[in-house]
Image (cartoon, helix red, strand yellow):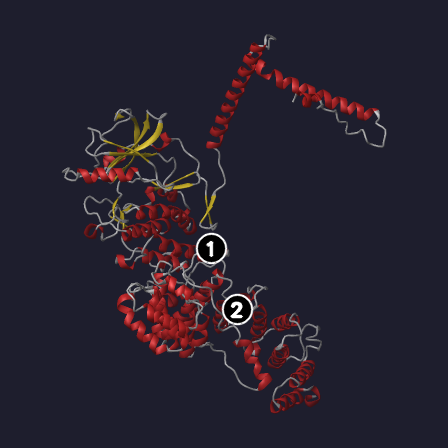
Amino acid sequence: MAEYEMGTEAVPYNPFEDDDYEEDDTIHALLDDLGSMRDDAATMTATAPAAATGTAPVPGPADTTALSSASTADDAGTRSRQQALSTFRERRSSTRRGRFVADGMVQLPFIRLRDPMEAITDPAEDIAKGIEPPSLSPGDMVAGQYEVAGVLAHGGMGWVYLAQDRNVSGRWVVLKGMISDPHNRHRSVAEAEREFLADITHPGIVKIFNFIDDPRSDTSFIVMEYVGGPSLRDRRRRQSGGVFDVALAIGYILEILPALDYLHSRGVVYNDLKPDNIIVTEDQVKLIDLGAVSGIGAFGFIYGTRGFQAPEVPTQGPTVASDIYTIGRTLAAMTCNLPVVDDAYAPGIPSPAGEPVLRRHLSFYRLLLRATHEDPARRFRDVTELSTQLYGVLREILAIRDGKQFPAQHSLFSPQRTTFGTKHQVFRTDQLIDGIEREVRITAPEVVAALPVPLIDRSDVGAGLLSGSSYAEPLEALETMRQAMQTEEYSASAEIPLGVVRALLDLGFTLEAKQWLDSLSERLGLDWRHQWYSGVTDLLLDDYVAAQDHFNNVLNIVPGEAAPKLALAAVDEMLLQQFGYTHRPLLDQDAIHTAAHSAGTDAALHMDVLSTLGESWSHLTSDPVALRFHSMRLYALVWATNPTTVSSAFGMARQLMAEKQVELAVNALDKVPQPSRHHRMAKLTTILLLVSGDPAKLTESRIRRAARRLEEIPNNEPRLLQIRIGVISAGLNWLRSTGLDCSASPNTLFGFPFSQRGLRAALADTLRSQARMAPFARHRYSLVDMANAVRPPTWF
């Protein structure tokens, strides 16, 4: 080793040694100056510890030198820890960017920490209302450990105190009264509940530190973590209009749902959810006040808040459904101006007719209705089901309000399988090819073939069996399910009998499928999948009224899904076809812009439209005005939220054209993305829409716009000539109906003069080209005859 060390030597490196040019005095001076700066910096670093302590290093023996080195290291460590502590304190009070939640759809604002002493309130106002004064005063010591600083609020179980834990570095804590048995008959149960509460650990729930008793108070205290931030109630008061933005409110609720789901998984319910018990601080959202937590179904001293507590709790006890109710009421209180009766929110959800946010976002309204339904069995089954629908509702709100689309990561349905109503307008021009007249109408089979299908519920006992047979032929899958239903293992499955219904529909046995659904109605009648397949079956049987009822039930159960909205829009359109209102205007301008979700609309509707929608804006209607409004609105909603559902764009365009809103219809189809395989069909449709309608109401601008769009279509488009014939005919008819010989602009149309003589020549030329492509000789001769009839020499 010694030999190795003797043979190893550092060699100075000169970076300019191999350069070809000569070093001048300037370079030498620069290097000398840099060297001096380096040496000075090294000297200052070496003497810094000595200067800080006011002493200078003294040369001495080896042990003295070692001691000095250790002292220097200790000083450096002290300084580094002080610097780290300073950084911690500085950043603790600094403002950071808000946090994105809900799959990146909502940004929660950053809330700075506040001084705990600022949270202390004066109890005098509550005492003046007849409330007993607090039993603890500032400075009191509780359990020899907690020094009371003051009161924070008064709740259902008495005063809530702010205190400092003198045994743990003066940590701030909250003392909250607990549910207690005044007769002390269930001490063992109470002790078990304490033990359970102490075991609750979730990042969205305040920590529980201790349980204490104090002779000055009749109740026991639960010692909890102090969360230094405002409650959602305080935040709501500071919002414009006294309510939260609905997207922000949903973001906050989605943040606390995992905490409630955690409690439910542990066999307890929270019981007292309300904006007061949700605290926001920095980028955290936490549940506080676990004093009302109880076991699922446990009767006894159950506490809640009037206006938030479920109506069945006093008679049936707390359940997951009662917690779902409080979630719905909390959302409603955060976003709506709920009426107050006897210092508490009145039951029920306001009507959309009187609440703009609910009128604008009907899916949110229906979610609140289901969450707060009087019948617990009709509410969301659990937090997960509610959360899935909240994500869907949030996507719709952001799409309508901000024009932002987000992936549908939470859905109970498959994507749309194909399209319906996308080709009728263009295919109608095929009459020029074969002479066969076509009509623009959608049919039940094409709608059913295009609609999404329910995904398999993975929690169902038959999910594995159905997943294995999902790619089998319907007849083979039907036989597999028949054998499964004969076994005890799958007797409780809901997916297998519903899978039988789906297989029967795929095989075309619609009446047999209806019989199966009727036999399952008593067991699965409230299941949204049963309602969905019932709607599909009635649609195939052309019973549009019954189909509307079933799809409306699906929408009420799963309001965040796009599938029932698309189905309802199609059913309403087919009802309008059946009643003969396909091309008849029914709405005023306000209703049209509201239904189409046009930018800047405030959902102001004429009373004639409002009267047809009713208080709850139900979809169960046969009134043509309401049918047109709902069909247009639902198509627009699905298209704005899901840009891949092209059927909704074409459906919206059809409804707008029925209302003579050509520009709005063209704008809707112009949003079909270019990569879509339906982009060309959408563009061809817009060309036809621009030149459709009464020739006297056409304009030169619209005709030229249609021509420019057609010129952008590649020459390999099979329907290029027939669309061109449509544009030229529209231009010629417009000139004749207005009594003009030529257009105002001298520019040509498809290379021909925009005049009656020029367009006749263009039309004759295009008809002859079209005749060469006709599949039948008889129709070929008809096209040539038409060309001869319109050619200029015939007329001039």
Q: Residue at x 61, y 15 (%)?
A: 47
Amino acid type, mark 2: Ala
Q: x%, y% of residue 230? A: 38, 38
Q: How many marks?
A: 2
Say which residue label 2 marks: 665
Rendered image: mark on residue 398: 1
Viewer-closest of 672 and 185: 185
Q: Is residue 354 visible?
A: no
Q: CA distance from mark 2 to mark 1?
A: 22 Å
Vertically, is 780 above or below 537?
below
Q: Quadrant of residue 410?
A: bottom left
Observer-side mark, 2 or 1, equals: 1
| In the image: residue 583, left or right of residue 489 | right
Secondary element at tag 1: helix
Q: Local crowd at mark 1 within 10 Å, few (<14), some, or many (≥20)?
A: some
Residue 271 in view here: yes
Instruction: State the residue at coordinates (51%, 63%).
Output: 644
Please provide percent x and percent y for residue 753: 71, 77
Q: Amino acid at mark 1?
A: Leu
User: x%, y% of residue 216?
Assistant: 20, 28
Indicate left or right for 37 with 334 as reference.
Answer: right
Question: Which is nearer the eye, 295 or 709?
Answer: 295
Asked whether the residues under the numbered discs 2 and 1 touch, taking CB atoms below 8 Å apart as contact, a structural biologist would say no
Image mark for residue 754: none
- Left or right of 664, for residue 534: left
